[in-house]
Amino acid sequence: MGESKKERDFFLEYLFDRAMNFHLDSKSILSYMFKDISFLFAFIDAKESIIFDVRDNPGLTGTEIIDMVFLKIYDFVVANNDTFRLFGNETLLHDDVFDACFFSSICMFIHSTKRLSGVSLRKFLYKYSTANYSLKGSTNYFEYDDYTKNASDLLTSEETKLRQTRYRLLSKRAVYNKRTEWSAIAADSEHEWSFYYVLSELNNDIQETYKRIGNLYNDINKERELSNYVVDEKRLDGAFDKFTRKVKKIKYEQVLDLHKIIISHIKSNMLYSGLNLYRFERMLRLYQITSITIPN
């Protein structure tokens, strides 16, 4: 038992050290691992098995190693969780679900790794703001390296506003991993977030549509959070009625126009376009909306 505890503690320390390479809540990861010690030891054995398999196949390319490692981890997780048995390697769903999990995991890695340097809100504003701080000849131009000497109060005000906007948006999500000040906006999100200024230049109808979509689920989400304690059917019905009224105020053609503009913006920088399109569909459901068949 002493050896087992020593092995467990060593692995948890190793896992924590590795987690520090990502913008993640490392304490929550350790807490989760401690909930099921038998799963933890099984995971340790799986890790060792994967390492041996990689060593036994020295001719594998980097891509082949990633494919093999992820497949083994996927099959291990599925086999050790009754909820996921439906997606096991003997089922028809295996390949499709594996591909989806593989893609989303790669996206999470790119978004969370500290190997890719993000940008601070200040640097982001300097590059993208419509105040044109980086454009020589503009009223607000200044050299970024001389920020402390030359920057105006306008940039400070914009930075505060963007920080508040970003916090309100991200804090509503199920997972919100805070990043350091100097890497506030992840590399894969920089172009995506620059739409913030593209939007500010669009006509009022499109801006209003964007705002309405963003506020659609506010009342329902509040009730969902409260439902962890008690379900109030009357309040829930009221929230759904508010949602319905909000939906009726949104014009379908303006939604399509907005989505076309967003997709055009994503395509204007192809570096992380696949990831950006994935997040776009996950949040705004364009394919799902346009694929709905309305019965006669």
Image (cartoon, rainbow, N blue to C red):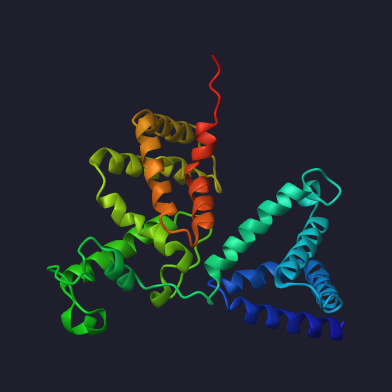
| Residue at the limit of the structure toward the top, as seen here | 296
The quadrant where residue 295 appears = top right
| Quarter that holds the N terminus | bottom right
Foreground pick, 146 / 167: 146
Looking at the image, which residue is at 48% across and 62% down?
271
* Residue 118 screen position, x and y as percent: 44, 72
| Quarter that holds the C terminus | top right
The quadrant where residue 12 appears = bottom right
250 sits left or right of 287 in the view: left
Q: How many marks?
A: 0
Looking at the image, which residue is at 32% across and 73% down?
123
* Residue 20 screen position, x and y as percent: 58, 79
| Residue at the limit of the structure toward the left, as seen here | 139
The quadrant where residue 129 appears = bottom left
* Residue 13 screen position, x and y as percent: 68, 83
Foreground pick, 73 / 42: 73
Looking at the image, which residue is at 30% across and 72% down?
122
187 sits left or right of 77 in the view: left
Foreground pick, 255 / 167: 255
* Residue 32 screen position, x and y as percent: 67, 67
Looking at the image, which residue is at 27% across and 70% down?
126
Foreground pick, 294 / 141: 141
179 sits left or right of 245 in the view: right
236 sits left or right of 29 in the view: left
